[in-house]
Image (spheres, rainbow, N blue to C red):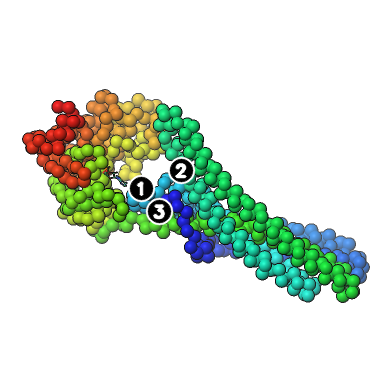
């Protein structure tokens, strides 16, 4: 959905994000050990300065000639190890989290009801899975690493400050509340901009995806400039929202550093007075100053980390928004091995949403086992909607649909859907071989059944001429095949599924007569012995149907055979006249 999800409770979202890290706590804790090592080296560095100055100037001690350089080397070695461990292990955990969230999101996408897809854009959904999830990793690992590591560093250095001179340290500490208040304020704006950026990134993906999908339409309408302008709008919005975040980030650092500098100046003022009064030695003074200066780097990183952290929280919110949207229920308790295929609609009414118009009104009809029923009616009369209720893409708003005298809602959803094959005019093929497209989750792709289905649906006829045979690739969404060939693959798929109920959207008008005859023959094989609901456009199908159902504005206006309906001289006869000019 295009709307930016409201981020109600950032802490709750963050806790939920971190719950994905829980299974990998061990690995993360190794990282924390690295962070502690790293943080400790900063404090040790300040201490080393004191040792060095004390040994060199205050009470000269020849041992420091080698002690301090070796100490420094050791410190950097430990620091290096700490740095590696504190990056590698949380990084590992982060990629696990991304993988887990992506898998969960993808699985949830597959289970979202059809109604969700009606209102969401696939661009936004793609962008959530690719872009937003990536931001989550940033928030749950790199940001956490910085957060823990640099907080520890700052705490260690503060400890050193108190150890060197507690009065001066107390002065430095008075600035802490001011800095934390500022960080909170900056944070809020980070979060606001982050969710806007993600929504605008979704728009960029959406417009791109639409343009890629519609490349032919764009070409034939010479609409390249038009599309570029549409893209320009979302692209500019994306830049603009990103700039707001960049500006907020850019200003946050100097402001915090300025406040820190004020503290630094005040502390140095008092420190120099203490040095003059001989209350503080030069070693303590310089070690204190070193620790104070060393604090500024982790403080800077800490302030910077809130950007990615808030982006991650906003991204997490948008991901959880989808995950919390209820998926399709598994359906009722009743299992169904193989239906006979009797279909009945009892007073079925349907609308796509509360504020949308009624699409079906009080529709009742019975289709006996093995019967071929043709649905006819003007475009928009509700034919596609009616058939989409049978495999429960949607549920009726009122009334019920029965398969074998049992309400479809009582069956397990997967069992119900196993009983239904759908062959539509726009065939959906996956970028895979012909064989795998036919077998699609139904059978072993190399089984004889697949070849039989390919034979019966006249797929073999063209596949045999391809160099790879059935193993030839079909291209992106089947782009390497002709419309008729794609259609035959979808029929083969339906033959292989061998479901007792068949739904056909039979608008194959774009096909040439050659493939038309093949498809007709393939369809004839498919329709045999099944209960078939055809959205019929072709005279031959309509005339030979056992039952013709005439829909008008969502109600059934006539049911009967061709001969019966022609006699009545109603809407059917009119439609017939109009469409077929006879
Ligand atoms: P037909 O198949 O007879 O052409 P449809 O069943 O496709 O008719 O459409 C019936 C009505 O339902 C139309 O007014 C159409 O605008 C509306 N409609 C179809 N699909 C949806 C949808 N997914 N969301 C909202 N309205 C829809």
Residue 299 in the figure: left or right of residue 108: right
Residue under numbered circle 2? 206
Residue under numbered circle 1? 118
| Residue 314, image x, y percentages | 52, 56
Residue plotted at (41% across, 29% down): 221
Tag 1, which secondary structure? helix
Chain-order first, disc 1 or disc 3: 3
User: How many tags in the picture?
Assistant: 3
Residue plotted at (43% across, 39% down): 210
Q: Is residue 409 above or below residue 40?
A: above
| Residue 36, image x, y percentages | 67, 65
Q: Is mark 1 within 8 Å of ligand 1?
A: yes
Q: Please say whether residue 87 is visible from this viewpoint.
A: no
Q: Is residue 80 above or below residue 569?
A: below
Which of the pair 446/203 is nearer the observer?
203
Residue plotted at (26% across, 45% down): 385
Is the Cβ of the residue at disc 2 closer than 8 Å to that at disc 1? Answer: no
Q: Circle 2: is it few (<14), some (14-19), or many (20+) Cα within 10 Å?
A: many
Chain-order first, disc 3 or disc 2: 3
Chain-order first, disc 2 or disc 1: 1
Q: Give the Cα separation between the discs numbered 3 and 2.
A: 20 Å
Q: Give the Cα separation between the discs numbered 1 and 3.
A: 16 Å
Q: Indicate the quadrant where residue 284 lies.
A: bottom right
Q: Give the Cα separation between the discs numbered 2 and 1.
A: 14 Å
Residue under numbered circle 3? 108
- Ligand 1 quadrant assignment: top left
């Amino acid at each position: 959905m295009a709307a930016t999800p409201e981020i109600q409770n950032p802490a709750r979202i963050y806790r939920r994000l971190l719950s994905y890290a829980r299974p990998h706590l061990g690995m993360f804790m190794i990282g924390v050990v690295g962070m502690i090592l790293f943080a400790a080296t900063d404090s040790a560095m300040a201490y080393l300065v004191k040792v060095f100055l004390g040994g060199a100037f205050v009470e000269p001690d020849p041992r420091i000639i080698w002690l301090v350089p070796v100490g420094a080397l050791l410190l950097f070695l430990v620091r290096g190890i700490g740095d590696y461990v504190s990056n590698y292990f949380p990084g590992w955990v982060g990629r696990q989290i991304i993988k887990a969230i992506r898998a969960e999101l993808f699985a949830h996408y597959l289970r979202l009801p059809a109604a969700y897809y009606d209102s969401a854009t696939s661009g936004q959904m793609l962008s959530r899975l690719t872009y937003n999830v990536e931001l989550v990793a940033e928030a749950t690992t790199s940001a956490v690493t910085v957060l823990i590591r640099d907080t520890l560093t700052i705490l260690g250095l503060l400890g050193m400050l108190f150890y060197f001179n507690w009065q001066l340290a107390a002065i430095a500490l008075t600035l802490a509340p001011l800095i934390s208040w500022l960080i909170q304020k900056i944070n809020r704006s980070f979060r606001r901009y982050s969710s806007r950026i993600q929504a605008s990134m979704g728009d960029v993906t959406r417009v791109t995806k639409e343009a890629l999908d519609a490349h032919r339409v764009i070409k034939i309408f010479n609409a390249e400039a038009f599309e570029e302008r549409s893209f320009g709008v979302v692209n500019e919005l994306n830049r603009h929202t990103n700039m707001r975040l960049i500006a907020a980030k850019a200003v946050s650092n100097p402001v915090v550093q300025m406040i820190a500098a004020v503290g630094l100046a005040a502390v140095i003022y008092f420190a120099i007075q203490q040095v003059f009064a001989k209350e503080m030695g030069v070693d303590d003074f310089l070690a204190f100053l070193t620790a104070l200066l060393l604090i500024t780097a982790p403080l800077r990183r800490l302030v910077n980390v809130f950007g990615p952290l808030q982006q991650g929280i906003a991204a997490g919110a948008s991901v959880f928004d989808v995950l919390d949207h209820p998926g399709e229920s598994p359906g009722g308790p009743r299992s169904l091995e193989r239906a006979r295929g009797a279909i009945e609609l009892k007073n079925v009414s349907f609308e796509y949403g509360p504020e949308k118009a009624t699409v079906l009104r009080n529709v009742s009809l019975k289709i006996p086992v093995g019967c071929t029923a043709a649905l006819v009616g003007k475009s928009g009369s509700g034919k596609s909607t009616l058939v989409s209720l049978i495999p429960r893409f949607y549920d009726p708003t009122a009334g019920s649909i029965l398969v074998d005298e049992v309400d479809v809602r009582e069956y397990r959803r997967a069992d119900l859907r196993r009983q239904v094959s759908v062959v539509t005019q726009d065939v959906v093929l996956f970028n895979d071989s012909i064989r795998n497209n036919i077998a699609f989750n139904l059978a072993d792709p190399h089984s004889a059944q697949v070849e039989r289905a390919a034979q019966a649906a006249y797929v073999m006829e063209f596949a045999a001429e391809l160099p790879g045979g059935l193993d030839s690739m079909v291209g992106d969404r089947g782009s390497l095949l002709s419309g008729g060939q794609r259609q035959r693959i979808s029929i083969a798929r339906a033959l292989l599924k061998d479901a007792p109920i068949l739904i056909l959207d039979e608008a194959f008008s774009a096909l040439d007569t050659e493939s038309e005859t093949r498809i007709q023959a393939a369809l004839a094989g498919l329709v045999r012995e099944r209960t078939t609901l055809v959205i019929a456009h072709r005279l031959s199908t309509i005339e030979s149907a056992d039952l013709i159902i005439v829909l008008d504005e969502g109600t059934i206006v006539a049911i009967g055979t061709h001969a019966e309906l022609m006699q009545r001289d109603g809407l059917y006869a009119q439609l017939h006249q109009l469409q077929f000019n006879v």
